[in-house]
Amino acid sequence: MDIETPAALIDETRMAANIARLQKRMTELGVRLRPHVKTSKCIEVARRQQEAGARGITVSTLKEAEQFFAAGFADILYAVCISPDKLDRALALCRQGCALTLLVDSVAAAQAVVAKGHPFEVMIEIDSDGHRSGVQPEDAVLIEIGRVLHEGGAKLKGVLTHAGSSYDLNTPEALRQLAEQERHLSVRAAERLRAAGLPCPEVSVGSTPTALSAQSLDGVTEVRAGVYVFFDLVMANVGVCTPENVALSVLTTVIGHQPEKGWVIVDAGWMAMSRDRGTQRQKIDYGYGIVCDASGRAIEGLLVGAANQEHGIVSRRDGAADGSLIDRFPIGTKLRVLPNHACATGAQYPDYHLVTAAGATEVWPRFHGW
């Protein structure tokens, strides 16, 4: 493979299967899929999701919203609570014709939104698992926020939640229970708003683990998920995929050896793989990633066990010094590494190299920043 390393590769066949899998599940459960494009930050990847049946996109930065809107994606949910200093950028997008939905979880943020005098479409974030942001479904402030928005001239679009604690689980039963909790609490919040005479047409939930584990989505209108498009080793440990499903990898080159330690040195350090060691606290610690051959087949027992900025150390998972690795992987050998966290690893690169089933490649740009 004549690509300068390190480089981010997308296995087209695996990605297509991942997209089809979740889209089919959401169709069967009767909800829209609004993929979170922060994972790829790539127009071409999002187009593949759209072609498979996704409706709208979710973003985590206004730069993503601007870039995707410029590429023809008009229905965009900015799923991070809006800060007042970003409202002018959001307003500019709306005035260009973008159907942009904002998010708040406080009275102060809601007041800042309505103070702009524009009928922004806004959702209220609900805390369904104590993981991060959001309003408790039974809290009186939920109704207060809703009234500030509705009476202030904004369009109260609905409620949104994200069960991020699903990343800490690893059994099907626990994932099913959290998916139902996510569904139930967000629907309950919507019911309270409606009972107070406030509009709440949309109920938006989602994380990759709960999207793939939900048994019912009654009362939910859409699901958001992101990392499913590539998957990663954290998701493999959670149990919603296997390493063989991971579509993103880092192509790297052997640049040295430490024979007495049984180490193979590659040019993919933590700058190439990211610092994310998410599997360290899970049932299997994959170091900085699973080592594969150049075609993407995992090599049994090998991982990038340690990394410096531009050096990765390939070794046996059991820590044994294996001098045979030096002969197996001479200088110049190309290897691939499956990442712990696809979002973080992808963020290290200006583009992806799409690898087709036939082995052909093409370059797909991605973007950075806020």
Image (tube, grey):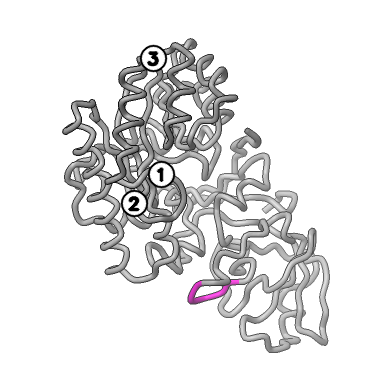
Q: Say which amino acid is labelled 2.
A: Ser
The kind of secondary structure the magenta stretch mainly shows is loop
Q: Nearer the viewer, residue 59 or 363?
A: 59
Local secondary structure at mark 2:
loop
Name the residue located 67 percent from the left edge and 54 percent from the top edge: 1
For the residues labelled 2 and 1, the Cα–Cα distance comes to 8 Å
Quarter assignment of residue 271: bottom right
Residue 177 visible here: yes
Which residue is tagged 2? 128
Mark 3, residue position: 119
Q: What residue range appears in magenta? A: 282-286
Q: Nearer the viewer, residue 204 or 41?
A: 204
- Cβ–Cβ under 8 Å for marks 3 and 2: no
Left or right of 277 on screen, residue 173: left
Q: Nearer the viewer, residue 273 or 19?
A: 273
**Comes first in the chain, label 3 or label 2:** 3
Question: Residue 366 occupies which quadrant of the picture?
Answer: top right
- At 57% from the left and 46% from the top, the residue drawn is 360
Disc 3 marks a residue whose amino acid type is: Pro
**Where residue 364 sits: x, y (%)?**
59, 37
Residue annotated with mark 1: 134
2 and 1 marks in contact (CB < 8 Å): yes
Instruction: Check the picture and name the quadrant holding the C terminus.
Output: top right
- Measured as percent of width and height from the top left, residue 149 is found at 36, 23
Which image quadrant for residue 88?
top right
> Amino acid type of disc 1?
Gly
